[in-house]
Image (spheres, rainbow, N blue to C red):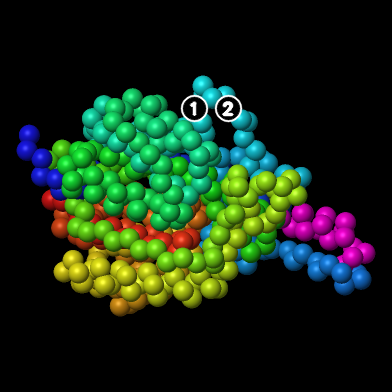
């Protein structure tokens, strides 16, 4: 077989945790915590030494984000006012880790959809925002569990990890270094979320996705040509997480809020929307594509308002649900997996020749674009 060294997306895979937390359940738990906190600190609040915590509401959450529910790997401890964080039994070193486990589920789904055996894959990239350990690499564990020869490594570009992973995989294909690469994004984001923070406790959910990037000569007939990719990073502290072994040297710092997800939401909105919109339009122009002619946008699922505005700036009109589908309402923000879930669930109906864009953006700041065209 003659290899063309032209990268395509052969298939995607998805694993969705079965447990769901609705906004109503989340608000009940959060408000119970608020009531107890305010009661326990009544004297300090009355004296003006401490500000009372404000309750949350379903209306506030949906207006702020568009999120109505989220999937999680551990529901009961998240809603338990005594805990308000996921609690998972620690596994032995000879057991498959939870991050690898859900990643393997998504990878097997992608392989099955492509009609591909794991033995035909050359590499695994684990591209996600929250790794459960520094080494050995999660990608190598996933590689072993799937029975893949070759190599694997982890990469973290926060919410843009998956699209950065797709370009990396595509570059391996273009260089002839690999014919088939799995980009796996297991995102257990519930672990880095401060469930006691009114402004962010509703944002994240858990999931795992996989994207099989292959040489066009190997790909199944039903695939997506990768027309072009573009990556960009600009340093910003507006989204930050200081967790890490170097930042946990002192016991008193272990529970500090900045060891979890923190952001300046308004600043992020103001700075990221124009940057992402301009980058999409510029890259479309470089590829000879009319951004207004894109059939569908699969955007990062972080905030409904951001996506509406970005889609409007790119397409020249307020995009319909068909043009810019959302999974944010039922999945929440799943970091790098969000745009891949949207693509996975809302791409089969497109016709051969239709063009679209997978785009992610997030902490860093980071932005990744993958322009695709359906084969056929």
**218 above or below 337?**
above
Q: Position of residue 361 (x, y in %)?
A: 41, 62
Which image quarter holds the N terminus?
top left
User: Does the segment drawn in magenta span residue 102?
Assistant: no
**178 above or below 313?**
above
Q: Distance between the residues labelled 1 and 2?
A: 8 Å
Foreground: 264 or 18?
Answer: 264
Q: Residue furthest left?
A: 2
Query: With 249 as the anchor, is 65 left or right in this view?
Result: left
Residue lying at 16% horizontally and 69% vertically, measured from the top left: 288
Residue lying at 63% horizontally and 42% vertically, measured from the top left: 86
Residue, disc 2: 91
Q: In which quarter of the image is residue 365?
A: bottom left
Q: Do the residues labelled 1 and 2 touch (CB within 8 Å)?
A: yes
Magenta residue span? 30-45
**139 above or below 328?**
above
Secondary structure mostly seen in magenta is helix
Residue lying at 68% horizontally and 41% vertically, measured from the top left: 77
User: Does the segment drawn in magenta span residue 34?
Assistant: yes
Label 1 SS: loop
Q: Quadrant of residue 369?
A: bottom left
Q: Position of residue 242 (x, y in %)?
A: 59, 54
Label 2 SS: loop
Query: With 283 as the anchor, is 14 left or right in this view?
Result: right
Residue, disc 1: 96
Q: Where is residue 269 in the image (x, y as percent from the top left)?
A: 49, 72
First in residue order: circle 1 vs circle 2 = 2
């Amino acid at each position: 077989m003659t290899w063309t060294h032209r990268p395509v997306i052969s298939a995607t895979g998805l694993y969705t945790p079965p447990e769901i937390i609705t906004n109503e359940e989340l608000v009940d738990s959060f408000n119970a915590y608020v009531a107890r906190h305010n009661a326990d600190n009544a004297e300090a609040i009355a004296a003006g030494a401490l500000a009372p915590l404000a309750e949350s509401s379903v209306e506030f959450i949906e207006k702020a984000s568009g999120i109505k529910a989220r999937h999680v790997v551990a529901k009961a401890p998240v809603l338990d006012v005594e805990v308000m964080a996921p609690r998972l039994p620690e596994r032995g070193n000879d057991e498959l880790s939870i991050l690898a486990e859900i990643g393997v589920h998504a990878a097997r789904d992608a392989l099955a959809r492509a009609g591909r055996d794991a033995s035909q894959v050359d590499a695994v990239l684990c591209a996600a925002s929250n790794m459960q350990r520094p080494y050995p690499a999660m990608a190598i564990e996933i590689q072993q569990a799937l029975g893949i020869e070759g190599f694997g490594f982890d990469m973290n570009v926060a919410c843009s990890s998956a699209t950065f992973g797709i370009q990396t995989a595509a570059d391996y294909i273009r260089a002839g270094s690999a014919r088939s690469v799995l980009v796996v994004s297991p995102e257990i984001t519930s672990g880095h979320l401060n469930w006691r923070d009114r402004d962010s406790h509703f944002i994240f959910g858990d999931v795992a996705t996989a994207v099989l990037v292959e040489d066009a000569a190997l790909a199944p007939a039903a695939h997506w040509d990768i027309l072009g990719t573009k990556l960009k990073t600009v340093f910003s502290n507006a989204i930050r997480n200081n967790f890490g072994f170097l930042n946990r040297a002192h016991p008193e710092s272990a529970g500090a809020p900045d060891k979890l997800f923190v952001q300046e939401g308004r600043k992020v909105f103001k700075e990221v929307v124009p940057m992402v919109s301009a980058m999409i339009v510029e890259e479309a122009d470089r590829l000879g594509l009319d951004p207004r002619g894109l059939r569908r946008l699969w955007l990062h699922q972080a905030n409904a308002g951001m996506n509406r505005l970005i889609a409007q700036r790119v397409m020249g009109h307020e995009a319909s649900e068909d043009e810019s589908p959302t999974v944010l309402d039922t999945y929440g923000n799943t970091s790098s997996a969000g745009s891949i879930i949207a693509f996975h669930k809302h791409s089969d109906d497109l016709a051969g020749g239709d063009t679209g864009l997978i785009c992610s953006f997030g902490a860093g700041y980071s932005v990744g674009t993958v322009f695709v065209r359906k084969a056929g």
